[in-house]
Image: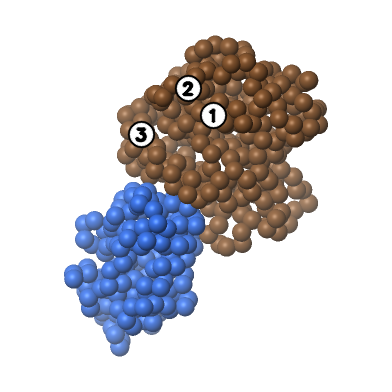
Amino acid sequence: MTPHTIDVCAVLRSAVNQNYGNLLTRDTGMAVRHQIERELMAHREGGITSLDFSSIGLMDYSCADEVVAKLLVLLQNDDITRGGYVIFRGIGEDHLELVESVLTHHGLALVCLCEDGRPRLIGRVSDAERRAWDMVRARGQAAASDLADEFGFGEDFVAEVLDELFKRRLVRRADNAFLALDATDMVQ
Amino acid sequence: MNVILVPASLDDQTFEQVLDQLAPLPPDARILLDARNTTWASPYGLTALLTLAQTRAQKPQFMPPTRDDTSSYWSRANFFRYAEDLFEIVGTVPFQRPERDSRTLLEITPVSRSDDVHTVVERIKDKAASILTQNLHLESRAVMGFAMALSEACQNIVEHAGRGGWVAVQNYNYRKRMGRHVVQIAVCDAGVGIRQSLESGNRRPLTDRWDDGVALESAVIQGTSRFPDFGRGQGFKGIRGYLRKWKGKLAVRSGSARVAEVPSWDDDVPRRDHIAPMPGTQLFIMIPEEVDR
């Protein structure tokens, strides 16, 4: 599955007509999010969209709240991607703390492809969700029955955890199997 | 004419002496602010003076510092550029030389729109990075939080004040308390203030007591905003988190109350009520030099 990439810095420059490359102020965040929403809605069904933050300079809480948190809430509740997934990339170590704080406040989580190329789950997830997500990522794909023994709980419990990850758009689903939003998906 | 004496050293604490002198006077009383003996002012002191002028029904008179180095510094900090509109200046305003003061990260700058916040942060980001890492010996990741704190502080004006305000940022040696370098961000406005802002959004908490102190604590400590969206009101939380990490100080004054996030090096009080009133919201952030590194 080849991802569609949205360069957040390019969106920023076009949405608010400024050349700074900084995600600052709530107004700016709102304008950027609206444009990302339009691009996501125009994209084909079921794909993976990569939101690329690698050219973003500075960021503040209000803007991150608009661009990251409100976008994730919309993706989870209104499914504007029609079954699609969003993976974040280029969120540098400098931004990570701020983004985590925004996500934690809202009880949200996202998959981020970090500078080392490995996907990371950031934000608020339960220990069971994080463990299941790690196991799916390590295997590439897995069904609840594949993980139950290692997990140490019954298959039904693991299925519930995986289903929750799927609802939160943190893993993909194909029939009974759950697939990682894997680094290999990101190769264009 | 009511003469208000400006203290020799004007900062967030001594500015209260100015307000104490003003408190018995009606808003339309003619006043003269006498700063002739003032020899030093923090960014908070300078921006608060401009803000004070905005609150008066009659244009106040202002006597500049007599010491050349002081008035010349105030001039380079852009104070007189805006003071000439807000005050009737009694005396001579020094000619503003084109060079910038090396301690000044950001001269007094008006903030009223979202674009102003972008401009302010962009203007100082490189110099701030250099001062935070080289003068204050902070890790480079402190720079992102600094920009966040500056941006969130300025956005309070844009989002809540209902009128423009001022921001200034300076690096100086805080001999009075620490003998260390600090960076101070001052953001002052003469807008509606935090209590009225919360009331306008029907965000007053369900409590018997409701005054400026409760409103301030609700906004600054508990993250209440006049907007009902769940992500709102978190700017102060972000600023406080950043300052806790770098042992910095935050003080916010609005109406007749003041709350502060007090680091271990300071002996300020966390909350003061029933102080002399001043319209709007005035805040300062102070980040000290790291001495353990």
When asked about the image quadrant of residue B136, the answer is top left
Q: Are marks 1 and 2 in contact (CB under 8 Å)?
A: yes
Tell me the chain of label 3: B
Quickly name the residue at label 2. Answer: B96
Quickly name the residue at label 1. Answer: B81
Q: Residue furthest bottom?
A: A175
Circle nearer the viewer, 2 or 3: 2
Is any atom of residue B270 visible in this view? yes
* Crowd band around label 1 with a 10 angstrom C-alpha radius: few (<14), some (14–19), many (20+): some
Question: Where the C terminus of chain B falls, by quadrant?
Answer: top left
Q: Position of residue B46 (x, y in %)?
A: 57, 27
Q: Residue at x 54, y 11 (%)?
A: B67
Circle 3: residue type: Lys
Question: Where the N terminus of chain B falls, by quadrant?
Answer: top right
- Relative side of B7 to B23, left or right: left
Does dot 1 land on a helix, a strand or a loop?
helix
Q: Position of residue B199 (x, y in %)?
A: 71, 54
Which of the pair B194/B55 is nearer the observer?
B55
Is any atom of residue A153 visible in this view? no
Q: Which mark is residue B210?
A: none
Q: Colour of chain A?
A: blue
Q: Residue at x 35, y 52 (%)?
A: A19
- Give whichever of discs 1 and 2 has the lower sequence position: 1
Q: Colour of chain B?
A: brown
Quickly name the residue at label 3. Answer: B127
